[in-house]
């Protein structure tokens, strides 16, 4: 019974991440399906929408995102340099975030603040957990050590909550911004729309996969710190 539960938990955690990667990888070929690259389409869409101040640049593999602080759409090489359906669709998704920013879309603004606060909170959580043995052994304050542990684990768990809270923002960028742009502009080839919807769903659920991976990290800390 325990083995079955562990298998179910592992599947719930790793299958979404596997599915997201599989969908994006599937539609990266052929790499020349469209005339322009993902980077070129992103630039074209931004200019067409009057967002000339938003830049487009290449980033590291698997790190596609829109940076609201630098006002920059960043695409991985597979999406910036290629002309696959995945490249075109992911580029439109990230442009969707730029449109949200220009419109003052509040969930995006909240997410930006949360992500910045999260980075500081997680660093604090690691420090608090590291201080726990000092409080218990050196200072002989077991109660303080337990408090540090609880607060530290809570800050680490906050990342899971933040990732899940970003899902509405991702869905909005995919289906209220990117998909209408692709459809109304006639950028998709006949028959590609259902596949583009699948890619946009995968792009939106990237943060869900990340939150589930955060559960793995949280569980690992619990295992390490368990007496």
Image (cartoon, rainbow, N blue to C red):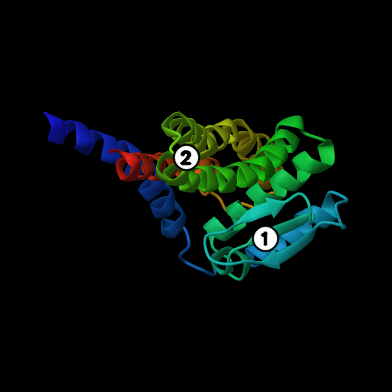
Secondary structure state at the residue bearing disc 2: helix
Residue 208 pos. (x, y %): 48, 38
| Residue sitting at x 27%, y 35% | 9
| Residue sitting at x 54%, y 36% | 155
Tell me, yes or no, if residue 185 can be seen here.
Answer: no
Q: Is residue 9 above or below residue 66?
A: above
Viewer-side residue, 51 vs 7? 7
Spatial CA span between label 2 and label 1:
21 Å
Residue most toward the left? 1
Residue 74, numbered circle: 1
Residue 182 pos. (x, y %): 66, 47
Quarter of the image where one finds residue 113: top right
Tell me, yes or no, if residue 181 can be seen here.
Answer: yes
Kindly identify which residue carries mark 2: 211
Quarter of the image where one finds residue 117: top right
Viewer-side residue, 67 vs 174? 67
Quadrant of the snapshot with the C terminus: top left
Question: Which mark is nearer the camera, 2 or 1?
Answer: 2
Query: Callout 2 environment at 10 Å: few (<14), some (14 to 19), or many (20+)?
Result: many
| Residue sitting at x 42%, y 39% | 136
């Amino acid at each position: 019974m325990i083995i079955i539960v562990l298998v179910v938990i592992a599947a719930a955690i790793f299958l979404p991440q596997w599915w997201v990667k599989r969908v994006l990888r599937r539609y990266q070929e052929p790499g020349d399906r469209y005339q322009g690259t993902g980077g070129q389409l992103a630039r074209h869409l931004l200019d067409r929408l009057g967002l000339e101040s938003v830049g487009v640049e290449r980033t590291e593999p698997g790190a596609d995102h829109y940076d609201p602080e630098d006002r920059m759409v960043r695409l991985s090489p597979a999406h910036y340099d290629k002309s696959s359906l995945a490249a075109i669709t992911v580029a439109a998704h990230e442009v969707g975030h730029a449109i949200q920013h220009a419109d003052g879309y509040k969930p995006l603004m909240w997410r930006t603040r949360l992500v910045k606060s999260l980075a500081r909170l997680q660093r604090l959580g690691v420090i608090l957990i590291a201080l726990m043995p000092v409080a218990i052994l050196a200072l002989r304050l077991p109660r303080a050590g337990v408090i540090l542990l609880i607060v530290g684990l809570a800050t680490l768990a906050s990342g899971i909550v933040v990732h899940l809270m970003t899902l509405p923002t991702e869905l909005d960028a995919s289906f209220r911004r990117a998909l209408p742009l692709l459809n109304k502009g006639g950028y998709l080839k006949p028959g590609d729309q259902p596949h583009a919807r699948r890619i946009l769903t995968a792009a939106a659920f990237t943060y869900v996969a990340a939150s589930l991976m955060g559960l793995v990290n949280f569980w690992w800390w619990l295992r390490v710190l368990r007496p």
